[in-house]
Image (cartoon, rainbow, N blue to C red):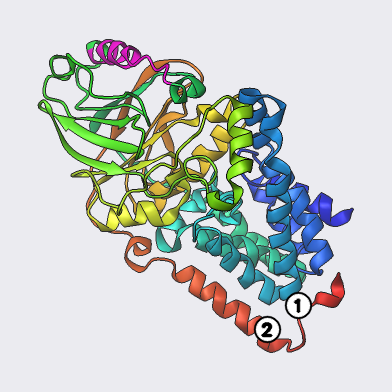
Amino acid sequence: MRPFLLGLALALTLPPFPFGFLAPLPLAFLLRGGFREGFLAGVGFWGLHLIWLPQSFANLFGPLGALPFLPLVLLKALSFGLLFALTPSPLARLGGWVVLEWLTEQGELAFPWGFLGYALAEAPGRVLAAWGGVYLLSLLVLLAAYGLAHRRPWVLLPWALLWLWPLPQVEGEEKGLLVQGNLNPLAKVQGELDERVYLRLTREGLARHPEAGLVVWPETAVWQIPEGLDTLLQGRPLITGLNLFGPNRAVLYQGGQILAHYDKVRLVPFGERFPFREVLGRVYGFFFRAFGLGELANRTPGEGIAPLGAYGVFICYESVFPSVARGLAREGARVLVLLTNDAWYGPSFGGRQHFAMGRLRAVETGLWLLRAGNDGITASVDPLGRTVAAIPPHREGFLLAPYAQREGATPYVRLGDWAVALALTIFLFGLILRVRLPGWRNW
């Protein structure tokens, strides 16, 4: 029972909960124990961290929508159990935990949620992500926990500094108009999309804020570029998502033509693509019919990551992948633009959790982030991870969002995931210091 409660406590230190400053405390007790302790802690942690899944999907699809929650939690808890079993010392576990986080960003089933570094999302010390990404922040959280576990209370001093670090002001000289349509996501899938709301809100927004030099609509906002848009934009560029049947596409439109497009590379498993469909075809068919969606086809993934001119555009789920934003920055993006549709989260806290994680991409790349959401959170985030402008979610509206185009590259953009290599070294060093068979006897 104790590991389960510690897992719950650890989940409360990650967004959207405001207790990140307490993260080292439950972790200090979770640096010891075997498979059983890890599995129980994982059930508590992932059960609370992902509680938005049954809340949101049951709200959209009825009780059957909650079914994927239990197997997902058990699989993620199993990963904790294996981590604990294979790390017989606190030092090995410290390094192995970060390596496990990195592994969850890889492959076809990638689901990079629950990184410990997000405990620092509200701390000024998050700026260290510019040096080593969210993985460096995870290492810092674990190092603080390691110090407490070994009765080194002085680690609380550098930990406190991460929360008291003064940050300078950053000015955004340019202005963008971000439009929030607040459309029902299920209606969009079923072809009941009314794109006129974006024309109306853009017209109202530009009338009130003619200084806006860029217009941004969210993910899958329209089926095609609507007629009469050129007169409305008056030469301004528009970045919008297109609701196509194949790729999940974002386009840069200006002067009557699409200048460039980007197709989403990181597709949502079991949402935009359906792994192992040859084997699980009947299972998928059952859920499609139960949810009233018909027979959904896999979306077509993009061929690579590339900015649309100066704009590093990425889409929804991709905001939790450090590698996507880093790739855009390496390719010359001078501002990040995220198009998303978080209406799937419904009334749960999933949308706020998603937003908090995505803010770290601005810090990692040193670029401004403009975020246009179908139902929110629509916001402007500065390169230090602060939300400088936002509008309330779950209603239609528009936002005059300050930003600036920046050149140069942070150490993280240049060097990548060196913190993961450091964590792997710590993991191996921890094993060498305690040579014995992994702790399977701790079941």
Q: Which of 292 and 13 is in front in this view?
A: 292
Q: Is residue 406 above or below residue 354?
A: below
Q: Residue 88 carries which label?
A: 1
- Do callouts 1 and 2 mark residues in contact (Cβ within 8 Å)? yes
Q: Which of marks 1 and 2 is nearer the N terminus?
A: 1
Q: Quick one: label 2, few (<14), some, or many (20+) residues within 10 Å?
A: many
Q: Residue 431 carries which label?
A: 2
At which x and y percent is residue 130? Answer: 40, 57
Q: Is mark 1 on a helix, strand or loop?
A: loop
Magenta-drawn segment: 191-206
* Callout 2 amino acid: Leu
Q: Quick one: label 1, few (<14), some, or many (20+) residues within 10 Å?
A: many
Q: Main secondary structure of the magenta part?
A: helix
* Residue 196 part of the magenta segment: yes
The reply to whether residue 111 is in sight is no
Instruction: Tell me how far mark 1 sits from mark 2, CA to CA.
Output: 7 Å
Q: In this view, does 10 lie above or below 255?
A: below
Q: In this view, does 36 lie above or below 242?
A: below
* Callout 1 amino acid: Pro
Residue 392 is left or right of residue 241, and the answer is right
At which x and y percent is residue 377? Answer: 47, 29
Q: What element carries label 2?
A: helix
* Residue 44 part of the magenta segment: no
Q: Which of 133 and 215 is in front in this view?
A: 215
